[in-house]
Structure formats: C-alpha cells, structure tokens
Image (spheres, helix red, strand yellow):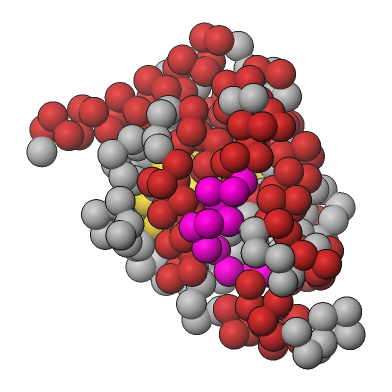
Amino acid sequence: MPSLPSPPFIEVPGIANFRGVGGSHVGPGLLYRSADPSKATKAGLEKMRQNLGIRMIFDLRSAPEIKRDGKEWASVPVDDPDVFKAHGIERQWVPVFAEEDYGPEQVALRYREYTKSGSEGFVKAYHDILLAAPKSYGTIFRYLAKDKPAPCLIHCTAGKDRTGVLIALLLLQIGAPADEIADEYALTDLGLAERKPEFIERLLLNPAIAGNREGATNMVSSKRENMLASIEMIRKEFGSPEKYMKEYCRLSDEEIQKIRKNVHEGALEHMGRS
C-alpha cells in the first residue's frame, strides 16, 4: 500500500500531472512538480500564482523539446517577460540535456534494448541523467538553500524522469525512506494516465520499437520498482545524495543543511500544527 496518505494532485487548467511533493518529509506548499506547462491557461497561471503562491518555475527540458512543443504559456513565447511579470512568476531554464530531446518517448527509444528487462532501462537512463544534471540540479538545490525560498514548480516534458530523479535525490537527502520515495514517483502513472496511450501509440510507429507494445508500455510507466532500483543505483554509484550534491553539484555543507531545514523542518512544523 502507498505510504502517502492520498494522491496530492491539484487541478491546474492546462497542465497534466500537477501535484505537490508531500508525505511526512516535505513541508506543504513549497515544492510542486508537473508535466510540461506550455498549455497552461490564464486561469492555470493565476491559480499557480494566487492560490499556490508559486513564484519560481524550473524548466528541465531541452531546446528541441521546447521547440517541438511550440510556444509556451498559452501561446506566449518564453522570452517574452511580460507574461511572467503579469503573473508574478519567474521562469528559469535549467536543461539537463540542453540539445537532446529527453521526453518519455525518446527515453524509450534510446534505451529500447531494455524494454523487456524490468527496471534495467530506467536505472541506465537515470544514471545518465545524474551524470548530465549537476549544473541543472545544482541551480535548483541552491534555490532551495536560500533563506525562506518561495514555492516553486519543477517540470520536464512528462514530469516523470528528470523531474523524478531530482525529487528522489531531494527526498533521500532529507531522510525519506525508499518506499515513500517510490510511492511518490509512482503517482506519475496516475498523473499521466490520459497521455500514456498517446506516448505508446507514437512509439509503436517508430520502426525501432514497432510491435513491442509491452516494451513501450513499460518504458513510459512509472512503476515503484523502477525507482527502488534507481535508489539502489544512486547509493552504489554515487555513495549518497549528500555526496552527489557536494561532489557533482558543488554544494557546500551549509547549503545542504539549509535545504534540509527549509524542506524537512517545514514538514515538522506542519505536523505540529495539525
């Protein structure tokens, strides 16, 4: 059974897989995650700013993904500052892979030799993400290490892989158990339920994976066992989340402690008030 009390999804018009990162280790209202918000409506943007208090959005996507998906923010180009000023939201582009498409379909194609091998493809994909992500993730971690960071949204194309690895690292760093992290990750299967058939059908049109519906379905999933295996990989290959943050992202001990205080102590304060 999931260790999270209930799926913390929030209806934000125009955005799929939008939810708060919760459980017993994250203070409410600080971290949100989602799929690509490029089709957010005006009402969606207003809800993020006014109801959720979001002031910062971190976009992990690559340039090809942004170009492919068209103009963002209800058909307003991302380099138009007025849309952000109008809603009081700042956007930072922090691509894990600046020039490589790394959406769910491209991940499935890149690691198609693993499509029938359980969690192996995800472990390999997530290892590659971790090697490429220090600059991107480091920017987000440093934001969370600020004094009283404002609520923020973190997203990639599906809010599944690059976003999922970052959230897993963060939850590991503040002491969340592997089962809780895996359950939080698995919620993406619910958050993307309406879009998964679209991902699968497009994959099956590619000759590299044509006819392999089982494999395609596996590679666009967010099974808890995939995250559990990836957590084992993190510990084996990188030592610990703290070590990754220090050696790869170049965070200081003080910054790491501030992240723990800002994220974890917010949860303790909330539990004390409830």
Residue sitting nearer the eye, 157 or 69 = 157
In the rendered image, the vertical position of residue 141 relative to residue 82, given as above or below:
above
Query: Looking at the rendering, which quadrant does residue 78 occupy?
Result: bottom right
- From the top left corner, tell me how far across and down residue 75 is, in percent: 63, 70
Query: Looking at the rendering, which quadrant does residue 156 occupy?
Result: bottom right
Residue visible at 49% across and 69% down in the picture: 189
Q: How many marks?
A: 0
Residue visible at 43% across and 62% down in the picture: 187
Q: Main secondary structure of the magenta part?
A: helix
Q: Is residue 153 magenta?
A: no
- From the top left corner, tell me how far across and down residue 199 is, in percent: 66, 79
Question: Which residues lie in the magenta part?
Answer: 219-230
Query: Looking at the rendering, which quadrant does residue 169 occupy?
Result: top right
Residue visible at 59% across and 48% down in the picture: 229
- From the top left corner, tell me how far across and down residue 113 is, in percent: 83, 67
In the rendered image, the vertical position of residue 258 relative to residue 220, given as above or below:
above
Residue sitting nearer the eye, 262 or 85 = 262
Furthest residue in direction left, as rendered: 274
Horizontal arrangement in the rendering, residue 156 relative to residue 228 (left or right): right
Q: Quadrant of the N terminus?
A: bottom left
Furthest residue in direction front, as rendered: 117
In the rendered image, the vertical position of residue 30 relative to residue 155, given as above or below:
above
* Residue 89 appears in the rendering: no
- From the top left corner, tell me how far across and down residue 21 is, in percent: 39, 47
Residue visible at 55% across and 51% down in the picture: 227
Horizontal arrangement in the rendering, residue 87 relative to residue 222 (left or right): left
Q: Is residue 221 magenta?
A: yes
* Residue 130 appears in the rendering: yes
